[in-house]
Amino acid sequence: MSAPRSSVASAKTAVVQVAVPQGLNFTVLGSLVDQLAIVAAKGIKIQVAASSEEASTAISTLLTLKHGKVAPTYSPLAAMAPSGQPDAALIASAWETAQKSCSVIMASAAEKNVIVRSLSGLAVGTFFDVEAASAPPVISPIRSMAVRARAASRKLQTTTTEERVAMLHRIADALVAKQDEIMAENAKDVAESTGKVADALLQRLVLKPEKINNLAVGIRAIAAQDEPVGRMLGQTEIADGLILDKVTAPIGVLLIIFEARPDALPQIAALALRSGNGLLLKGGKEATRSNDILHRIIVEAIGPIGNDLISLIHTRGEIDDLLALDDVIDLVIPRGGNALVTYIQQNTKIPVLGHADGVCHVYIDEKADLKLAIKLTVDGKIDYPAACNAVEKVLVHKSWVENGGLAKVMDAMKAAGITVHGGMSVETLLPGLPTPPALRHEYSSLDLSLEVVENMQEAIDIIHAHGSSHTECIVTADSVTAEEFLRCVDSACVLHNCSTRFSDGFRFGLGAEVGISTSRIHARGPVGVEGLLTSKWLLRGHGQIVAKDTGVEYTHRKLV
């Protein structure tokens, strides 16, 4: 926090003015009342000012009903404008109060935990304070990192393709050369987290030699790709001698928030470097040592601009404060569990690229090769149960019940150590199976759900109703049925006769991925270099003017 706001955090008395433009929003008032109780419990003396008698009565009543006590309430001198926005009189009143007696914070009641966060000294709302007004601007360390990352990104774009390719090769070589150091630091993280985090999280935390070697292979593959920045997307002759190009360009500054998955750091760093983007990384505390050494190796291999281009955030500040930097961060990519991704999607103005769930399906068609279907299903689950592209639900055509195929599927799952949870369609067919926790559930373990379906259309309906639009697979020998499934299923990745584990940036030939997107805007599926690019227009002329569209004769002829 800035020095002036530190005085707010140490305040012993606070006046909270609630300005209600028209009507009463009891959801907002209820939240404010709960926050008042939290602040009061910390020993801060609270007075509440309401902009109307109605609001004052409502707050007093809610405090009595919810917390058994009433804070003093009174009507303030300045009320909220009818528009619901602070008018000039209210702003003037706030500044006058700040000059005469105490600091004032003006913020929206709809902002999450606005009272608690304001009185904790966080940068919430507009701060009216004499000392703050005369002090030089204070830039938070995180904001400074983002600003430097953008500057470094622009500098990176001035380097040649050969120079950036050389940086990537140095990173790959350094990861292999310093594998023992990386493994030693990772072992400390794993030892400290064992028994404290879920098994699925622990699996993601572990780095093995083959994983590090695969990282190096992927980074070299990224280096071998054609130059992505400045690639021609289209060219149009606007008029004689007036040529318009559309070319690829970096998005700008990326914020990647990831949990206990240190292998994500080199992948993301390499993709950001190849695409010319600046990068802020916020890793989970479980992987602190692993992330630190990987970051140090990478920035040293990049060279002088490395530290500014790719920053690893160590502060313990709230994720909310990172997500508030919508003026200096262009894209957030969360890599983690459902709770993390959902929270980020709901609490930032910055565009978010990613997925909240990986509920992937395998549909075993009536014309499937059953041995192949079993092999693909088992691989899709046991190869890496915690992965977002692991199989979570198997849909079996009803014909396999009558001919004994369903029993063979069950035997194969049991032999592989997979626990099958039976849905409603198999309750009488396979009694005694555990019930799935929900119709849509990501196990991230050696568990999956099983349903029997009448036909492919029912399978597709289940996928659309209870899937996550991530990855789905059909196993069938009928090419017509397979093509219909591929065409009709609305997911990021739709497969035929292959494991869902192929849904991955490295395996798709992208070199690596920053994540898998289930969004329908910009990038979808495994996101590699191309998913981190936008476009810009370059118009080259010879002195042409518009002159109300009489200065040139438009041709609009497509050249590329």
Image (cartoon, rainbow, N blue to C red):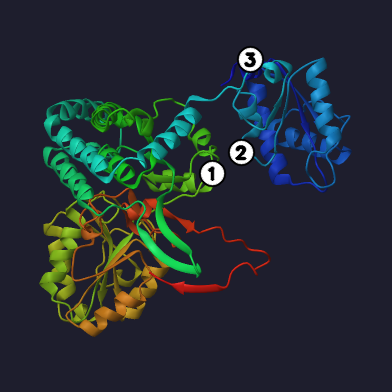
Numbered badge on residue 112: 2
Secondary structure of the residue carrying numbered label 1: loop
Left or right of residue 209, residue 451 in this image: right
The residue at which mark 1 appears reads as: 347
Left or right of residue 540, residue 190 in this image: left
Q: To which quarter of the image does residue 380 belong?
A: bottom left
Estimate how packed mark 1 is, as few (under 14), some (14 to 19) or many (20 or more) residues with alpha carbons within 10 Å: few
Q: Nearer the viewer, residue 173 or 350?
A: 173
Q: Position of residue 466 (x, y in %)?
A: 40, 65
Q: In which quadrant will I find the N terminus?
A: top right
Front disc: 2 or 1: 1
Numbered badge on residue 10: 3
Left or right of residue 417, residue 555 in this image: right
Q: Nearer the viewer, residue 166 or 558?
A: 558
Q: Nearer the viewer, residue 16 or 140?
A: 140
Image point 30% across, 40% down: which residue?
269
Alpha-carbon span between mark 1 and mark 3:
27 Å
Q: Position of residue 18 (x, y in %)?
A: 78, 35
Alpha-carbon span between mark 2 and mark 1:
9 Å
Q: Residue furthest front?
A: 542
Q: Amino acid at mark 1?
A: Asn
Q: Is residue 6 visible?
A: yes
Q: Amino acid at mark 3?
A: Ser
Image point 47% across, 69% down: which residue?
237
Q: Amino acid at mark 2?
A: Lys
Estimate how packed mark 3 is, as few (under 14), some (14 to 19) or many (20 or more) residues with alpha carbons within 10 Å: few
Q: Is residue 50 visible?
A: no
